[in-house]
C-alpha cells in the first residue's frame, strides 16, 4: 500500500556520516551518495528538486523521473540498522516522459507532514507523429503533495515498479494515452488550473486574446488524491472500481497535473526550450511573479500580479536564434540601447495594446521612469548573449570588458605550456574550430550577495559573467554596456565550463577571513577558485591583488551544476535541522520548498551531476566541513 506522509515520533541515533573527498588546497569537499557501483540514473540528469528537508531528491532526466532516498531505512520496521546518505538508494518513479526543469511556484506547510503547493515542470513527451524529429517539450503544473506522495511510494515500496507513461503503450498501471486525464475527483482539485478567458485585460478587438492559467485553488481548495473524498461521478473511459483500487494511487499522483498551454494559447503548438521564474521579493504574499518561456522562435512573457495566482500573457519577443538559457536580471538604463526589430521584436501584448509598441507600461511599479534600473532578460544563444529589457523591449548585445592586461592573461592561460594540468584540459580551445577566436560560449549569469564589514548589515550585490574560460565579477545591477565597465576581478579557467556558481563562505571565527568560492563544472570535472572578499577588486589600493587559491577535481567524468542547497557536511538527524531555501542561480536550476526570505545561509552547498559511464549518471554534493563539530539543531518548523 502507498505510504502515508512520514512522521517522526522518535529520533534514532544518526547513521554513519558521509565521508567526503577533499579538494585541496581549497576548503571545498565532495560528497557522494549511495553505492559507488550503482548509478542514480541511466540517462542524462537535467534537474533536481529536494523534498522533505532534502531526505528525498527528485531527479529529472531524459528518460523520466527518479527519486534518491537519503535515508532508505527510516521507514523499514524490520531493518534495525540505521541507514543514511552513504546508503542512499535511487528508484525510477516513471519512464517515458523526460523531466528537464522543476520549480516550486508556491508551497505551504499544513503541519501534517506533506506540503501543499504547485510545481512547474518542463516535460518532454513522445511525438504525436513519426514526422516530428524530436520529442515536444511542454510545461505542466503538478500538485506538490502528489509528487511528495509519489516519491515516498517509489522509495519505500520494495516491489514498486516504475510507471510507464509512454503515450503509445499501456504499461503496468498505465492507461495509455489517457494518462493525462485524472479522474473527476482529482479534476475538482485542479479545476482552477486550466487556461481560460476569465480575466479581461484591455486589448484592441484586432488583437488575439490569450487564455490564462490559474492555480488559485491549490492552496485553498486542495483535495489530496490519497485522502478520503466523496464518490466521484462515473467516467465513460474507465471503471470507478478500478480507480478506487490502491494500486492505482501512484498513477493518480503522477497524472495530477494540468498543462500550462490550452487551446488558443501561443504555447499550444510550440515546444518549450527553457524557462525562468522571477519573484518580486519586495512584495508579500502570493503573486508578483513573472514567467519567461523560450520557444524556438520567440520568448513569451507571463505575469501573475500581486494577490493573484494566475498567469496572464503580456508580451512576446521574437528571437532569430534558439535561446539556450534565459535569466531575469536587473540592468542599468541608458538611452543608447538599441531597439532593433531584426534582433528582438515584441508582438501582441495585452499590456501595451492601448499605446505605442515600445512603452514602459509593463512593470510592477507605475513609476518606472523614475528608477535607474530595469528588469531585463539575459539570453544566452549558441555563441552570443544579449539582454532584452522587459519594459520596452530594448535590446543590447553583451560583451565582456577587454584590455591589454586581460588579453595577455588570456593568452597565457590558453598556452599548452602553461602547466601540465592546462595542457590536457585546453584541448577544446585548440581543436581547430576557432572557438578561442570566437571567445567561447556563454553560461548563465550568477547574482550573489557580499556581506558588509563586521557589525554592518549592508550587503553588496554583484554578478558573475562567464564566457569561454573567463569569468568577470561585475556590478549589480548589470551595466547597460558591460564591455565599457572594468570588472572588479577577472578569473580564468583551464577548461571551458558549462556552468559556474558562487558560494560566499563566512568564517566560524571572527579572525578568519571570509572568502568567495567560485566553482566551475565542465567536461574535465570541477574547478574551484577562492578569493578573499577583501580582494574582490583588483583595482583597490596600490598593492598587487592576491592570486586566487585554485584546485581541480576529477569527479569521474563530465560534470554539471544542478542547484544550490543542502547542508550534508553537518551532523544530521532525520526530521531535524532547519531547512533553507535557495533561489535558482541559473535558468536550469530548481527551487527548494522552503521560504525564500532573507539571505542564503552561510556555507550552503551545491548539488551537481557527473557522468561516470555510458549509462551511469550520479548526483553529488559540494560543500565544506567547517561545521562538522557543530552539535546544535533546530527543530523543523
Image: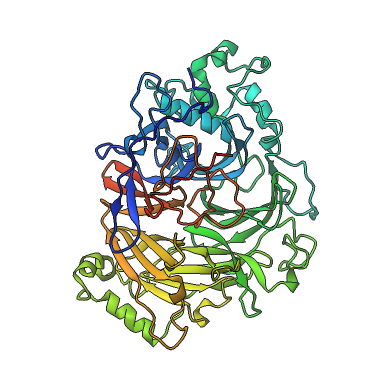
Q: Classify residue 28 as left or right of residue 332.
A: left
Q: Classify residue 635 as left or right of residue 284.
A: left
- Residue at 44 percent of width and 48 percent of height: 567
Q: Nearer the viewer, residue 535 or 387?
A: 535
Q: Position of residue 154 (x, y in %)?
A: 43, 27
Q: Nearer the viewer, residue 116 or 611?
A: 116
State the residue lying farthest toward the top. Answer: 241
- Residue at 57 percent of width and 11 percent of height: 241
Q: Position of residue 84 (x, y in %)?
A: 36, 35
Q: Position of residue 476 (x, y in %)?
A: 57, 70
User: Which quarter of the figure has residue 72?
Assistant: top left
Can residue 288 be seen from the camera position used here?
yes
Q: Position of residue 96 (x, y in %)?
A: 42, 33
Q: How many numbered badges does the structure rendering display?
A: 0
Q: Nearer the viewer, residue 550 or 443?
A: 550
- Residue at 48 percent of width and 75 percent of height: 399
User: Which quarter of the figure has residue 413?
Assistant: bottom left
Q: Classify residue 248 as left or right of residue 282.
A: left
Quadrant for the C terminus in the image? top right
Q: Nearer the viewer, residue 604 or 634?
A: 634
Q: How is the image coloured?
A: rainbow
Can residue 320 be seen from the camera position used here?
no
User: Which quarter of the figure has residue 114?
Assistant: top right
Looking at the image, residue 260 lies above or below residue 336: above
Looking at the image, residue 158 lies above or below residue 541: above
Looking at the image, residue 77 lies above or below residue 564: above
Amino acid at each position: 500500500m502507498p505510504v502515508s506522509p512520514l512522521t517522526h515520533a522518535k529520533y534514532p541515533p544518526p547513521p554513519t556520516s558521509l565521508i567526503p573527498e577533499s579538494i585541496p588546497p581549497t576548503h571545498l569537499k565532495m560528497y557522494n551518495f549511495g553505492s559507488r557501483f550503482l548509478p542514480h540514473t541511466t540517462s542524462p540528469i537535467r534537474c533536481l528538486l529536494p523534498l522533505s528537508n532534502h531526505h528525498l531528491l527528485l531527479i529529472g532526466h531524459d528518460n523520466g523521473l527518479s527519486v534518491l532516498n537519503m535515508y532508505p531505512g527510516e521507514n523499514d520496521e524490520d531493518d534495525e540498522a540505521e541507514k543514511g546518505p552513504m546508503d542512499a538508494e535511487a528508484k525510477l518513479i516513471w519512464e517515458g516522459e523526460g523531466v528537464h526543469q522543476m520549480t516550486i511556484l508556491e508551497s505551504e506547510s499544513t503541519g501534517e507532514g506533506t506540503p501543499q503547493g504547485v510545481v512547474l515542470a518542463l516535460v518532454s513527451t513522445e511525438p504525436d507523429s513519426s514526422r516530428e524529429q524530436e520529442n515536444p517539450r511542454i510545461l505542466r503544473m503538478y500538485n506538490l503533495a502528489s509528487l511528495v506522495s509519489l516519491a515516498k511510494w517509489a522509495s519505500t515500496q520494495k516491489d514498486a515498479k516504475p510507471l510507464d507513461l509512454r503515450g503509445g503503450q499501456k504499461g503496468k498501471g498505465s492507461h495509455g494515452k489517457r494518462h493525462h486525464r485524472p479522474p473527476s475527483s482529482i479534476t475538482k482539485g485542479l479545476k482552477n488550473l486550466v487556461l481560460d478567458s476569465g480575466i479581461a485585460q484591455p486589448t484592441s478587438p484586432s488583437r488575439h486574446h490569450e487564455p490564462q492559467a490559474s492555480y488559485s485553488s491549490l492552496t485553498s481548495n486542495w483535495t489530496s488524491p490519497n485522502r478520503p473524498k466523496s464518490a466521484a461521478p462515473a467516467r465513460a473511459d474507465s471503471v470507478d472500481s478500478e480507480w478506487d483500487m490502491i494500486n492505482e494511487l501512484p498513477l493518480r499522483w503522477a497524472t495530477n497535473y494540468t498543462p500550462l498551454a490550452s487551446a488558443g494559447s501561443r504555447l499550444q503548438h510550440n515546444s518549450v526550450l527553457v524557462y525562468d521564474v522571477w519573484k518580486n521579493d519586495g512584495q508579500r504574499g502570493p503573486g508578483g511573479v513573472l514567467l519567461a518561456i523560450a520557444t524556438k522562435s520567440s520568448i513569451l512573457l507571463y505575469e501573475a500580479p500581486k494577490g493573484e495566482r494566475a498567469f496572464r500573457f503580456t508580451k512576446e519577443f521574437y528571437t532569430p536564434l534558439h535561446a539556450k538559457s534565459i535569466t531575469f536580471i536587473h540592468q542599468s538604463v541608458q538611452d543608447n540601447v538599441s531597439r532593433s526589430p531584426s534582433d528582438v521584436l515584441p508582438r501582441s501584448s495585452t499590456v501595451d495594446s492601448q499605446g505605442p509598441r515600445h512603452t514602459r507600461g509593463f512593470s510592477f511599479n507605475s513609476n518606472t521612469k523614475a528608477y535607474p534600473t530595469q528588469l531585463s532578460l539575459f539570453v544566452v544563444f549558441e555563441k552570443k548573449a544579449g539582454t532584452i529589457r522587459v519594459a520596452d523591449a530594448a535590446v543590447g548585445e553583451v560583451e565582456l570588458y577587454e584590455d591589454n592586461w586581460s588579453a595577455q592573461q588570456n593568452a597565457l592561460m590558453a598556452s599548452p605550456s602553461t602547466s601540465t594540468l592546462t595542457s590536457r584540459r585546453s584541448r577544446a580551445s585548440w581543436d581547430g574550430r576557432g572557438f578561442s577566436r570566437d571567445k567561447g560560449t556563454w553560461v548563465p549569469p550568477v547574482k550573489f550577495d557580499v556581506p558588509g564589514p563586521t557589525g554592518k548589515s549592508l550587503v553588496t550585490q554583484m554578478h558573475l559573467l562567464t564566457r569561454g574560460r573567463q569569468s568577470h565579477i561585475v556590478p549589480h545591477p548589470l551595466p547597460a554596456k558591460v564591455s565599457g565597465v572594468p570588472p572588479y576581478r577577472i578569473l580564468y579557467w583551464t577548461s571551458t565550463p558549462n556552468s559556474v556558481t558562487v558560494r560566499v563562505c563566512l568564517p566560524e571565527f571572527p579572525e578568519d577571513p571570509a572568502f568567495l568560492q567560485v566553482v566551475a563544472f565542465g567536461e574535465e570535472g570541477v574547478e574551484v577558485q577562492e578569493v578573499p572578499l577583501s580582494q574582490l577588486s583588483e583595482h583597490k589600493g596600490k598593492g598587487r591583488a592576491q592570486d586566487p587559491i585554485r584546485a581541480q577535481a576529477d569527479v569521474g567524468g563530465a560534470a554539471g551544476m544542478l542547484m544550490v542547497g543542502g547542508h550534508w557536511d553537518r551532523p544530521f538527524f532525520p526530521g531535524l535541522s532547519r531547512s533553507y531555501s535557495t533561489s535558482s542561480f541559473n535558468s536550469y536550476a530548481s527551487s527548494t520548498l522552503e521560504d525564500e526570505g532573507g539571505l542564503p545561509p552561510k556555507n550552503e552547498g551545491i548539488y551537481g551531476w557527473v557522468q561516470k559511464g555510458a549509462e551511469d549518471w550520479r548526483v553529488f554534493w559540494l560543500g565544506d566541513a567547517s561545521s562538522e563539530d557543530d552539535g546544535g539543531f533546530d527543530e523543523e518548523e
